Amino acid sequence: MRTRWIRWIALALAFCVWLSPLPFSLGATSDEPALPSPNVPPDSWSSLQQDWKSLQNLAQKAVPSPSSSKNGTPSSGHAAKRSTSTAQGVVIGVGDVGPKALWLNESLAVLGYLPATFAPSAQEPAQAVRLALSSGARAQTFKPLQGTWKLRYDQPNAWVSLWSADEDTPITEGAVMAFESQHHLAVDGIAGPDVIHALSQALASGEMAPQVPYSYILVTTSLPETLELWVNGKLVLKSLCNTGIPQAPTPYGTYSVYVQYASQEMKGKDPNGTPYDGPDVPYVSYFYQGCAVHGFVRQKYGFPQSLGCVELPYAAAAKVFAYTHIGTLVTITSAPLST
């Protein structure tokens, strides 16, 4: 009799598992599954679990705390501009237009941090170009060079539309954040005195950026909600995803990933005040305040369910995380430009 009950229980459990969501494959498709394994620098993300309190301690103290949201943290590259822009010395940030922004883009391109090439009009050796840009930083003249530009990739259009050579765009901000992370500077996307000094030294010393794939994440909230992962101008993954409910929406715009965790315990309160505690949430990449792209198990994907984050099935989240680094751009849009 006991054996019969055990068999019935086993059959029931198997049936439930068969009906349950399959986070390792549901809703995700890949146009290029055989990509080489990405090289994720070990210093760009932590494998340690981070709870709410420790994440708070990582936030920049000068940044005001936003309202509570799932996975909340007061750290944000965009929010940090409000405090960092008052630092002494030249500061170049998103939206700045003109010679300084052009100098910044030229410097980042020469160092290999931008997905764009810059070819000076004058036929000068590469080292002479680097020294000219470096001296402009030291003398605080920030005189750009004459030359031509070309983006390395022409897709997707939503990403291409962000670029402007003589403007500090979100693409520039992401490159600055990647540079800051590489040089152990505060990651805020702003070219302030410390960043400019480090850029000058890197240019003069012949330094080049680490060779990593250039990734871009495009999230579309029109139903069904989807996330696209673009790597080196190619669509390599498209997956159903979930964004924030009306009480805690995911913000529209383009942002840069500023911190990552392989696994994190997420605590907080729902909009109705009910506490939640999600242990071991995997593949977490924060891009705006408390909003992150991460893995999360749901019965279905493709419509608003989160408290501001972008939730993915585990397999899709793992691949997105592998190709994401500090400075990767995340665009949230209701309808992307046609590709």
Image: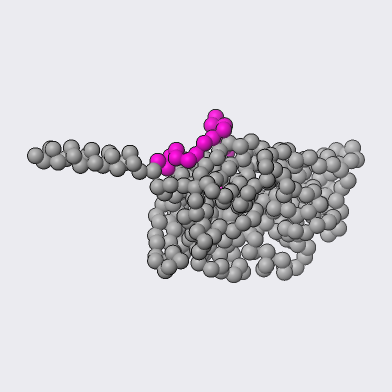
How many marks overall?
0
Quarter of the image with the C terminus in it: top right
Residue 305 location, x and y as percent?
47, 55
- 96 versus 212 height, above or below: below
Of the pair 334 and 169, the residue shown nearer to us: 334
Residue 160 location, x and y as percent?
72, 44
Q: Over which residues does the magenta segment extend? A: 22-44
Residue 172 location, x and y as percent?
72, 51
Q: Residue at x 33, y 39 (%)?
A: 18
The colour style of the image is: one colour
Of the pair 141 and 248, the residue shown nearer to us: 248
Of the pair 196 and 67, the residue shown nearer to us: 67
Q: Name which quarter of the figure residue 30 lies in.
A: top right
- 28 versus 254 height, above or below: above
Residue 124 location, x and y as percent?
88, 39
Q: Is residue 280 left or right of residue 163?
A: left
- Is residue 216 at least partly visible in the picture? yes
- Of all residues, the one furthest to the top in this rendering is 34
Q: Residue at x 46, y 44 (%)?
A: 313
Q: Residue at x 63, y 64 (%)?
A: 79
Q: Is residue 98 left or right of residue 17?
A: right
Residue 46 painted magenta: no
Residue 34 painted magenta: yes
- Is residue 41 at least partly visible in the picture? no
Quarter of the image with the N terminus in it: top left
Magenta stretch secondary structure, dominant: loop
